[in-house]
Amino acid sequence: MPSIVYSNLAQAGAHRSVAIDLPGREYEILIGGGLLNEAGRAIAQRLGKGKCGVVTDENVAGFHLENLEAALKADGRHKGSIVLPAGESTKCFAQLDRLSQGLLEMGLERGDFVVAFGGGVIGDLAGFAASILRRGVRYVQIPTSLLAQVDSSVGGKTGINTPQGKNLIGTFHQPNLVLADIDLLKTLPEREMRAGYAEVAKYGLLGDADFFAWLEANSASVLAHDTAALMKAVETSVKAKADVVIADEREAGVRGLLNLGHTFGHALEAATGYSQRLLHGEGVAIGMVLAFRLSERLQLCPAGTADRVAAHLKAAGLPTRIADIPAGEGAGSSHFEPDELIRLMGQDKKVKDGRMTFVLARAIGEAFLTQDVDLAEVRGLLSEECGALAG
């Protein structure tokens, strides 16, 4: 189980640490403010020798790259930085090729490491490149978004998107260190902060009803960057994910619960072309509400549960209905069709023997996996959702 200890990088209480105890692949997640400036020392303490290549995007580079490079250059580790376009569309074969060749041109050797400095897109892409570079090099995650700090930077999932679906090409490659500096979130656009909050709420909804109740009372403080509230939200989420990753590293079972809302959400992302119309966390928010509405429809959880979930996510500024997705160029939101969404859901990685796996719930904090879902019920739910678009 994850252990919580004080970091030795600062005074007790300033930073927290969660240990991921995977045999032979152990690593630490440090959480707190000011970690970016400590990056060189933190890496030296835990990874020893090795040069590094930094991977980031244009948005993060403008705010923070100079500080990170200074921290890494102080002990002679920095070999170069690669700045990629921001946005979900960067998770593609073309950018993977560009990134891989750039890292090789830096002269990174097998004993060196990649630093993924950005949100979920950069973490997934840079982690994938690290996993295949020279058949696998070490890498460090320095997540700069709330979504990445509480979810995508932990657990070793890497990958890119394809026209067939999201994250269908990738690897499991655990990082060697994660530095979650909550101070970096101060420069995060408000919409991105709210999108990341969906993944925080997810941990309460899937397995911790008390945490969800705490979020209902404290979400405004989390989103306003209150240090104590944000630390609790990030630490609780990371601990929850660590529990699951340790129990099921390669998603053979219980790790699938972390996909609450994602089967619906990924289909909506694909339908909107992985564009700014719908951020990943926004798709997850809508998907989680749909998962609870489907659970109610199947009489698996009490009536009114989905409305409670929707009310909280709406209060946090997140979309909760397909109708909340803004119209795209040349076509309105009414373009969504139930059968097309079901087809896209069928590309989900959790499909087994041709059957979709759904994460449903018996109550808030009681999620479970099932393949025993009549697609006619899913189609009926989506028909109601899409039908409401014309109303």
Image (cartoon, rainbow, N blue to C red):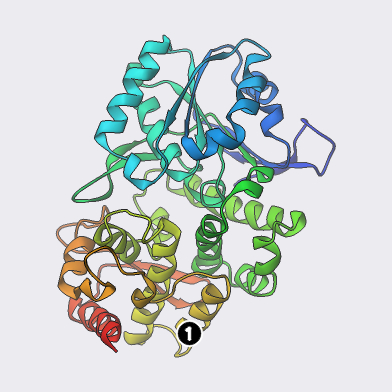
**Where is 300 relative to 203, above or below?**
below
| Residue on which disc 1 sits | 307
Figure disc tally: 1
Write the residue at 26% across / 78% down: 382
Would residue 114 be found to the left or right of residue 220 on screen?
Answer: left
**Where is 120 relative to 23, above or below?**
below
- Secondary structure of the residue carrying tag 1 is helix
Label 1 packing within 10 angstroms: few (<14), some (14-19), many (20+): some
Amino acid type at mark 1: Asp
**Which image quarter: residue 98?**
top left
Q: Nearer the viewer, residue 136 or 285?
A: 285
Residue 226 position, x and y percent, is 74, 58
Instruction: Say which quadrant the C terminus sits in.
Output: bottom left
Residue 207 position, x and y percent, is 53, 66
Would residue 247 be found to the left or right of residue 142 on screen?
Answer: left
Q: Nearer the viewer, residue 388 or 284?
A: 388
Residue 80 position, x and y percent, is 50, 16
Would residue 270 be found to the left or right of residue 106 on screen?
Answer: left
Q: Nearer the viewer, residue 182 or 309?
A: 182
Would residue 332 be found to the left or right of residue 128 on screen?
Answer: left
Q: Nearer the viewer, residue 254 or 81?
A: 81
Write the residue at 73% across / 37% down: 34
Residue 256 position, x and y percent, is 38, 57
Write the residue at 59% across / 20% down: 47
Please identify the residue farthest to the front as the structure is shown: 330
**Which image quarter: residue 95?**
top left
